[in-house]
Image (cartoon, grey):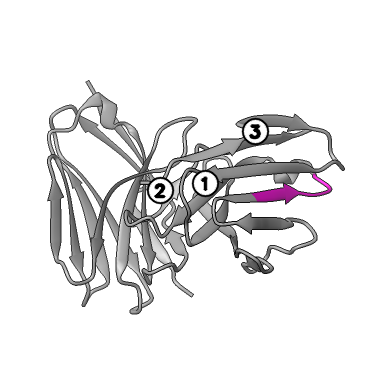
Amino acid sequence: GENVEQHPSTLSVQEGDSAVIKCTYSDSASNYFPWYKQELGKGPQLIIDIRSNVGEKKDQRIAVTLNKTAKHFSLHITETQPEDSAVYFCAASEGGYQKVTFGIGTKLQVIP
Amino acid sequence: SAVISQKPSRDICQRGTSLTIQCQVDSQVTMMFWYRQQPGQSLTLIATANQGSEATYESGFVIDKFPISRPNLTFSTLTVSNMSPEDSSIYLCSVSGTGSGYTFGSGTRLTVV
């Protein structure tokens, strides 16, 4: 089955700096890669996703890159703000209606 | 994207008892999933809830412990049976097939004492 590795497990950045979270996956059949943000006491919320036919996708301060050959994908948050503080999960799926496999999560702390 | 209502939001239960968690979606969805998130951990898939047939369980999870129902395309229940303190977790319902990836409910925070 799919195995998703995520690092770092914790990340502290100064407000205004950038944050990068990296993931690798094992199953070459995976072609859908969502990123989720989970705030304390809440369920995960989809913030951005990318499919295997795209190398990069950007949404305001958030961008995701995918290297399908190396089986790497990354989340980039620019101009970080205190409200970006949360746990971020990467995930991989074969898409369609298949199950999603999650990384261990990265606890991001943005220091004002 | 779909809106998911999950109940209860939290509960404290005695060991040996059972708790049924409900997941209601505001639109018909193809797939519904149940996840467990142990304190400070990632999300682990328990099972896929199939409409009109038995759920598909992941390795390490069995129907006797986590019976699941899915009577229609908008509703599912997960029961945690014969609970022990090790079952203390957040249980999350998730859906796909709505055109915007996978959506999660807010979760049920279960504490077993």
Any mark on residue A105, and which? 2
Disc 1, SS: loop
Crowding at mark 2 (Cα within 10 Å: few <14, some 14-19, many 20+) = many
Disc 2 marks which amino acid? Answer: Gly
The quadrant of the image that shows the C terminus of chain A is top left
Mark 3, residue position: B8
Compared with residue B55, is residue A20 higher up or lower down, i.e. above or below?
Answer: above
Disc 1 marks which amino acid? Answer: Gln
Q: Nearer the viewer, residue B67 or A88?
A: B67
* Residue B43: x %, y % from top left: 51, 51
Cα–Cα gap, marks 3 and 1: 21 Å
Q: Are marks 1 and 2 in contact (CB under 8 Å)?
A: yes
Residue A8 in magenta? no
Range drawn in magenta:
B77-83
Compared with residue B11, is residue A59 higher up or lower down, i.e. above or below?
Answer: below
Crowding at mark 3 (Cα within 10 Å: few <14, some 14-19, many 20+) = some
Disc 3, SS: loop
Disc 2, SS: loop
**Chain letter behind tag 1:** B
**Chain letter behind tag 2:** A
* Residue A80: x %, y % from top left: 18, 32
